[in-house]
Amino acid sequence: MLAQVITGQEIVAATQQVGLFELRLDYWQAIDMARVEKLIASTPLPVILTLRPMSEGGRYQGSESTRIAWLKKLITLSPAYIDLEHTVADGVIDELHAINPPVKIIRSYHHFTETPLDLTAALAALHHPAVHTYKLATLANSTLDALRMLVFVQQHDNVVGISMGEYGSCTRILAPVVGGCWTYASENEESAIAPGLLTIAEMVRIYRYSHLNLQTKIFGLIGNPVAQSDGHLFHNAYYQQHASNAVYVKFRLTKPELAEFFQLIKTLPIYGLSVTMPLKESVQPFVHQIDTTAEKVGAVNTLSIKNGKVFATNTDVMGVLQPLEQRTQLKAKSVLVIGAGGAARAVIYALRNAGASITIINRDTNKAALLAEKFDCRSDAKYFDIVINTIPDNQETSAFIQEIVNENVTSRTLAMDIVYKPRETRFIQHAKIRGAEIIYGEEMFLAQALEQAKLFQKN
Ligand code: ATR
C-alpha cells in the first residue's frame, strides 16, 4: 500500500493508487485539533497521525511532556493509526491505547547513521502488546544494508521496513514484493521530507507500484555508479507493455560487496540482473554457468537466476552489432575502436566475429596491443569505414578524442559512440563537425537492453 506523506493542512490524493495518508503534524506551525478532525473526516482512506520530535528526525520542538499531552488529545480524534516513536515509554503506550483502543498503534524506530546488524533484535526490543504495526527506518550505508532490510521485512509480519538514504530506494519500491505493510512516498519533490523518499509519481509511473505483490519477480542493475543508468526506465516500461509481473530496480554495488550480495539475495525473488562497470569481470566467480559469448568477451552484462543458479551472458555484443548491421555490412570493413577497457572488449569481439578488420587506439598502447592480440586484430589500415568510441565522455578524455576524430573521421565514416549519456557526447559532436554519419549510444543501449529483457522474460 502506498502512504502519501502530507506536511501541509490539506489532504489531496496525488493519485488514485494512494491507500493511506500520513499527516505529519510536526510540520504544522501549531496543532489545530478542529482542522485535524476535519481532515480525517474528509477522506475515506485511513489516516496516520504523526507528531515526530526533533530527536527522531521530525520537526516538533516542544517538550516531550507537551508532545505526549498532544498525542493523548489527538488519539481521541479516532485516526486509523497513530505513530509513536520507540522512545515513548511502554506505560504511555498503555495509557494512549486505553483512551481509544480501536486506534491502531504504530511503534516506530529510526536510526539515522546506520542499519543495525541485528534488525530482528531491534524489532524484539520494540515489542508491546498494544502495538499493531512496527516501523523500522534505518540509514542504509550500502546496498547490503538495504538488502538486509528487505530480507528482514520478508521474514516478519506487520512490519514497515525502510532503508533511508540513496541506497534505500529499493526497499521503498519493493515493499509489496517482500510483504511490507506499506511504503511512504511524497506528493512531489519539494515535499520529500525524508532522505531517499521517492515521489508518488515515480512509484506509480516508473515502478508501477500498485501492480507489485508477493508474486512479483525482481530484476535489477548492479554496478557503481548506477545513478546515470536508464535501465529502470527501459525495463519497467517493457514489463508494462508485456503485462509482466516484474519490477526493475538499481543496486549500487562495489566489487568487495559481491560475495555478501549473492548470499543475501538467495531468499529474495531476484530472477535476473544487468551488470555494469566495474563488475562486468569481477562478477564471474559468482556465476554457475557462463555462455561462450560472455566467456570469450571476458565480461558479463546479464545474469539470469533460476533455482538459485546464476547464468551469465553478454548482450552488449548483440547491442553493438544491431545498429551497425542496420546500416552497413560489416564483413571486411575497416573499423577503428577507441579505447581498450572493459567496454571495448564486447565491441571488438562482436566486430571480429562479424568479419570486420579492427584497429585499436588507446592512451595506454600496451593495453591496446594485448587486446589486439587476444582478439586477433591484425590491421595496418590507414582509412576507416567505421569509428567506434568506447571511452568515457569527460573533460579529461576530450582532447584525446578530438584528435582521433580529426585524424580519422570524414564525411564517409560511420561514427558510433557506445556512451549514451549525454546523448551528444564530445565524440559525437566532433564527428558531426567532420560530417560523419552518426550512431548514438542510445541505440546500443536499447538493443542490448531489449535482448536482456527478452532473456529475463524466460526466467
Ligand atoms: P570501461 O570498462 O568502461 O571501458 P575502463 O576499463 O576503465 O572502463 O576503460 C576506460 C577506457 O578509457 C580505457 O581505454 C582508458 O584508457 P587507458 O587504458 O589508457 O587507461 C580510457 N581513458 C580513461 N581516461 C582517459 C583519458 N584521460 N584519456 C584517454 N583515455 C582515457
Image (cartoon, rainbow, N blue to C red):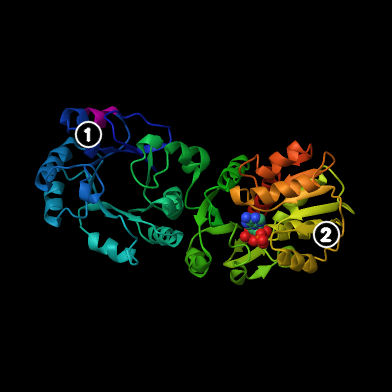
Q: Front-most of 88 and 425?
A: 425
Left or right: 98 in relation to 337: left
Image point 86% across, 60% down: which residue?
379
Image point 45% across, 59% down: which residue?
143
Q: Front-most of 243 and 299?
A: 299
Image point 15% across, 51% down: which residue?
93
Q: Residue 422's quadrant in the figure?
A: top right
From what the image shows, is residue 118 above or below residue 72? below
Comes first in the chain, label 2 or label 1: 1
Between marks 2 and 1, how big is the CA–CA gap? 66 Å
Q: Which residue is mark 1?
A: 28
Left or right: 112 in relation to 166: left
State which image quarter holds ligand 1: bottom right
Magenta: main secondary structure equals helix
Q: Is residue 318 magenta?
A: no
Q: Is residue 304 visible?
A: yes
Q: Residues within 10 Å of mark 1 (few under 14, many from 20)?
A: some
Q: Amino acid at mark 2?
A: Asn
Query: Element under label 1?
Result: loop
Q: Which residue is mark 2?
A: 353
Q: Amino acid at mark 1?
A: Trp
Q: Does mark 1 have its CB less than 8 Å from ligand 1? A: no
Q: How many marks?
A: 2
Query: Element under label 2?
Result: helix
Left or right: 64 in relation to 46: left
Q: Residues in magenta?
A: 38-42
